Amino acid sequence: MYYEEVFSWAENAEGKMVHVDTVPNGKRCGCICPNCHEQLVARQGDMNAHGFAHLSHGRGANLEICYRVTLLKLAEQIIETQKRIHVPSYYGIYKETDIEFVDVKIDFRFEREDRQPDVIATTKENQKYLIVFCFDDYVRHKQSFDFHNLTCLSVNLTRQNFNSLENFLLTSSEDKHWINNDVYFKGIEAKYKDKGKLVKLVSDDKCKECKIRSSCCAVMSFDYGFRTPLLIKNNGQQFRLCKTEKYKQELKEYCKQQEEDRLCREANHRRWEEKLLAKEYEQVENDKYNLSLIHI
C-alpha cells in the first residue's frame, strides 16, 4: 500500500507540512522527508499525479515508515491549525461530537521512548485533551501511557491516506476510542440526573459482593444480542451504572424475602422440636407402661 501512495505532502524549511501544489517544481521546492530528512523533489508534470520523491536513488529510507511519519505529522498539523477534532461516543452516554480548542501543542516524534502524548489540546473551559496516534502493526510508544485522571483519545491512522486524513480527523468517529475520559466520567451521574434518572457509579469489584447481584440493577448494554451490564473503564478500573431506585426496591424485596425465609426456618425448627419432644414423651409413657406390666 505505502509504495503505491503518492507522497503529496512534505516538510518545508520551517518545519511545516506543505502540499506539493503549493511549492515550486523540482529541487526548488526546498522540502525534506520528515522521517529520513532526505531532500525531496516536487513532481508536478502533466502525465502523472503530483507528488514528492526522494532525491537519492540509492537511499536507505524505508518508504513505509516515511509514509507513516508524513501522515502522522500532517495529522498533528491539521489539529493544530483547525483547533478541533471529531470524537467518538462515550459508552453511548455522550454522543460523538466536535471538540474545539483554544490552544494546541504538538510534540512530533515518531518513535517515543517517553509517555508523552502527540497532542495536548486545551478547551476554553481549560480542559485538557491528550491525543495519541497509532497504527495497527506498529508500537510507537515504548512505555505504557500514563492516562490516570486524564482525558486521552487514541486515533488509529492505519486506514487513512493524505486525501482522507482531514475529513477523518474533523468529521469521523471511526478508528478513534477513548483510552480514558476523566471529564466525561465525572459527569455521568449528573447527566443521567438531568434526564430524570438516578444512577450511581459502582466499581465492578464491589458489584461482585452485592447481595442481589443475581438480579443486577445496572444499566444494560446489548452485545451480540445479549443483555449485559454496561462496563465503563476509567483509571484502569471497571465500573457499572447502578440504578439506585431499582436497587433500593430490589434490596427491600430481597431483605423481605430473607426475613420470610428466616421465619419459615424458625417455624420449621419449632415444629421439628415439638415433634421430637412429643416422640420423647410418647417413649417415656411407653416405658412407664411396660414397667408397670413387669410389676404385675
Image (spheres, rainbow, N blue to C red):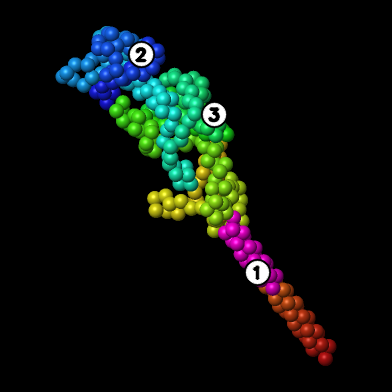
Quadrant occupied by the N terminus = top left
User: Could you tell me which secondary element the residue under label 1 belongs to?
Assistant: helix
Indicate which label's residue lies in the foreground, 2 or 3. 2
Q: Distance between the Cα atoms at labels 2 and 1?
A: 80 Å
Residue at the far bottom in the pictured view = 296
- Amino acid marked by disc 2: Asn
Mark found first going from the N terminus, 2 or 1: 2
- Amino acid marked by disc 1: Glu
User: Could you tell me which secondary element the residue under label 3 belongs to?
Assistant: loop
Q: Which residue in the structure is indicated by mark 2?
A: 12
Residue at point 43% right, 52% down? 222
**Mark 2 touching mark 1, by CB under 8 A?**
no
Give the quadrant of residue 13. Answer: top left
Residue at point 27% right, 8% down? 27
Binning the other alpha carbons within 10 Å of mark 2 as few (below 14), some (14 to 19) or many (20 upward) gives some
Indicate which label's residue lies in the foreground, 2 or 1. 2
- Amino acid marked by disc 3: Asp
Q: Is residue 35 visible?
A: no
Q: Which residues are magenta?
A: 244-267
The chief SS type of the magenta part is helix
Binning the other alpha carbons within 10 Å of mark 1 as few (below 14), some (14 to 19) or many (20 upward) gives few
Relative to 133, say whether 272 is above or below.
below
> Can you give x and y, in whole percent of width and height, for residue 180 in the image?
51, 36
User: Could you tell me which secondary element the residue under label 2 belongs to?
Assistant: loop
Between 290 and 191, the one lying in front of the other is 191
The numbered dot on residue 260 is 1
Q: Which residue in the structure is indicated by mark 3?
A: 146
Q: Is residue 70 visible?
A: yes
